[in-house]
Amino acid sequence: MSDQEISPSKHPIYRHETKDRPLQIAHGDEEAIALITQHVEQHIGPIYTIFHEIISDLVHIDIIVVAPTSERNYYTLVTCGMSNLPMAVPEGAEAFRYAELMLCLPPDWPMSEKAFHQEEHYWPIRSLKMLARLPHEYDTWLHVAHTIPNGNPATPYASNTKLIGMMLFVPETVKSFTEFFTLTFSPDKEVHFFSLIPLYAEEMDFKLKHGADALITKLEKAGVTEYIQLNRKNVCKKLFGLF
């Protein structure tokens, strides 16, 4: 489209406005829950708990939690329900219509219902739920290297961090990545598991200016993955006016 907003790196920018619509109640798919749960246990570890949604809009999003172990000393959180509906993918990307999301949290992250009353503890869960619902709410899709700011203008997720947005990538904390990334439900449905990497404002700006590949190179060099570190190194912080 001629009026499409384009970033300096020549990629389109999409801005989604809040829709005024009634609540569309959604329910969980028991078969899908069983398949995704089994898949997570096979490739990551035993399920510690599942955060169930009480009332769901558009899709029923649960959060599967795998507890820290000596081998994987962090919580792993995986959405379950985003793939209940197909995303509105562009022509040629039909194989990626179905997706789920994941991220990892430090082993001392407060995980109780009481703790989640504080946004400093809840924002990763909130982000998983919001992004899992976003494609269905705005008739769009999410894929590797897509970045989504926390609001417009973007603001930090909570008072304890300066991270202000997410980028989708491939899971790097799962050893059997190639087997975990794709779960085949049927010949017509493959679910892909993408990771979320929180970004700083400077990293989001760098991606807009120089493209996703340039940012990914910086993140990989610094060892940044879906494991959330509230005050990790900012790989694009300016030093004396230079990156």
Image: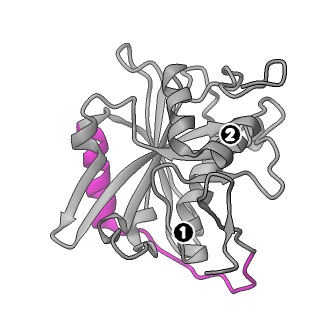
Q: Is residue 112 left or right of residue 26?
A: right
Front-lying residue, 76 or 27: 76
The percent position of residue 194, horizontal first and vertical second, equals 42, 48
- Which residue is the site of mark 1? 135
The colour scheme is: one colour
Residue 89 occupies quadrant: bottom left
The percent position of residue 69, horizontal first and vertical second, equals 39, 19
Residue 67 occupies quadrant: top left
Q: Amino acid at mark 1?
A: Pro
Q: Label 1 crowding class (10 Å Cα cut-off): few <14, some 14-19, many 20+?
A: some
Per the rendering, the mark at residue 49 is none
Element under disc 1: helix
Front-lying residue, 40 or 89: 89
Task: Of the two numbered discs 2 and 1 on the same chain, state the one appearing first in sequence.
Answer: 1
At a point 54% along the width and 44% down the height, the residue shown is 212
- Which residue is the site of mark 2? 206
Which corner quadrant holds the N terminus?
Answer: bottom right
Q: Compared with residue 19, is residue 221 higher up or lower down, i.e. above or below?
A: above
Q: Label 2 crowding class (10 Å Cα cut-off): few <14, some 14-19, many 20+?
A: many
Residue 237 occupies quadrant: top right
At a point 34% along the width and 59% down the height, the residue shown is 33
Q: CA distance from mark 2 to mark 1?
A: 24 Å
The percent position of residue 40, horizontal first and vertical second, equals 31, 43
Q: Compared with residue 196, is residue 242 higher up or lower down, i.e. above or below?
A: above
At a point 57% along the width and 70% down the height, the residue shown is 56
Q: Amino acid at mark 2?
A: Phe
Farthest-out residue, left: 187
Which corner quadrant holds the C terminus?
Answer: top right
The magenta-colored residue range is 18-42
